[in-house]
Image (tube, rainbow, N blue to C red):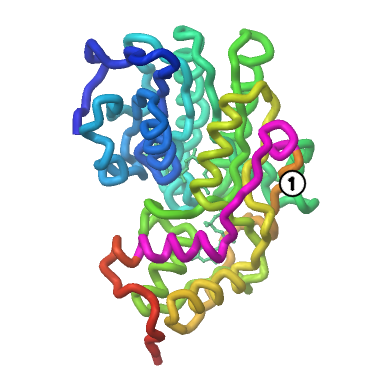
Amino acid sequence: MRDFLDTPGHGKRGLPGQKVVVIAGGAGFVGSALCARLISSGQSVICVDNLVTGSADNIASLAKHPRFRFIRQDIISPLAISGPVDEIYNLACPASPPRYQANPIHTFRTSIEGSLNLLTLAERKGARILLASTSEIYGDPEISPQPESYRGCVNTVGPRACYDEGKRAAETLFWEYGAHRGLETRIARIFNTYGPQMDPEDGRVVSNFIVQSLRGQPLTVYGDGSQTRSFCYVDDLVEGLIRLMASDEKMPVNLGNPGEFTMLQLAELVQSKTGRRTPITFQPLPQDDPRQRRPDITRARDVLGWAPTVPLDRGLDKTIAWFAQRIGAPMPGKPVLVS
Ligand code: NAD
Ligand code: UDP
């Protein structure tokens, strides 16, 4: 892996139409899928990541590509990137609750100081810039589904605040730079996304249930499992992010799959797919855990012509196959009875 900072020669446009794209957080779950997709469509990619939750493995297949560069850096520090930059995606931020709560002040600074540094870079380069915001800005929503006009119900002093309020502040920064400093800013409000290259240990529900099930361990349902989430397959999300970047839409856009499932339904679906009927154990519901979440994607349909194409059923098959290989578990197929 080339680990370089501001080396001459990088960030040069090649063929006509080829863009130079900076992806902050590009070694993470979503970021690495976006890097791969942009490289395969002929763009030059500069991945900036401090690897706090991402991994070099996620971008190993791109490391030797002549149009791919990796800079190991925390976006809390100002970025020095030479040469032209056309687009910047800000995906840098831990997304799993246990991970973003492990160092809450750093998480908060990542959203605020990191966003400011990337906005400054965008201003200097005349680049278009997109923020990976989140459905968490709606907090524990009082309405369902959640349209972009909903202003949310967020606890400013709870364990999720460092993430939720950090992203809310980042949205404000992006909006102000767009409205008052003329930057081309985009804001994606991403709902729960899953797929290959999630960190098996990062504590999110889809990875937890799959890994637990493949290992023959009990599935840990928090609370009574009646809380809901809407799960979007990563390829659908990446398509939505690219369309949003290319669009003229400056207001936030929800990107998510409107299919809504309780955590008990998800646990049962994972068990049925792995064929391993391990017990379900109920653990305390974390503080401020949202009761429900479902995107209204009318705006994404209207302005981006985007809607998810991969149903949970099919996305889980691909994700389970990837995890089985990743953790060295036998491929699902034959039921394994666990007492
Ligand atoms: P992830 O944790 O896998 O990836 C985040 C990446 O950002 C990692 O590679 C990490 O090392 C890097 N990073 C974190 N802080 C950094 C910093 N200060 N400087 C440089 N790099 C830093 O998470 P993900 O699921 O890929 O999420 C990507 C983005 O999308 C995040 O901004 C997240 O808030 C947003 N998002 C994701 C989801 C989801 O369900 N995956 C939902 C809503 C929003
Ligand atoms: N959850 C669960 N078991 C787990 C991990 C999470 O029941 O092992 C629940 C969690 O309490 C939440 C939902 O699953 O209600 C989604 O959790 P995740 O951490 O994936 O995302 P977020 O809470 O940020 O939506």
Where is residue 239 drawn, in percent x and y? 54, 39
Indicate whether residue 116 is drawn in magenta.
no
Residue drawn at x 29%, y 71% is 329
Q: Is residue 71 visible?
A: no
Q: Between residue 177 and residue 309, name the one nearer to us.
A: 309
Where is residue 136 drawn, in percent x and y? 62, 45
Q: Is residue 36 visible?
A: yes
| Residue 243, placed above or below residue 276 | above
Where is residue 270 drawn, in percent x and y? 50, 72
Q: Between residue 272 and residue 141, name the one nearer to us.
A: 272
| Residue 272, placed above or below residue 17 | below
Indicate whether residue 300 is drawn in magenta.
yes
What type is the residue that disc 1 sits on?
A: Asp
| Residue 248, placed above or below residue 195 | above
Residue drawn at x 45%, y 18% is 117
Residue 268, quarter of picture: bottom right
* Quarter holding ligand 1: top left
Give the magenta part as a residue range: 299-323
Left or right of residue 259, residue 19 in this image = left
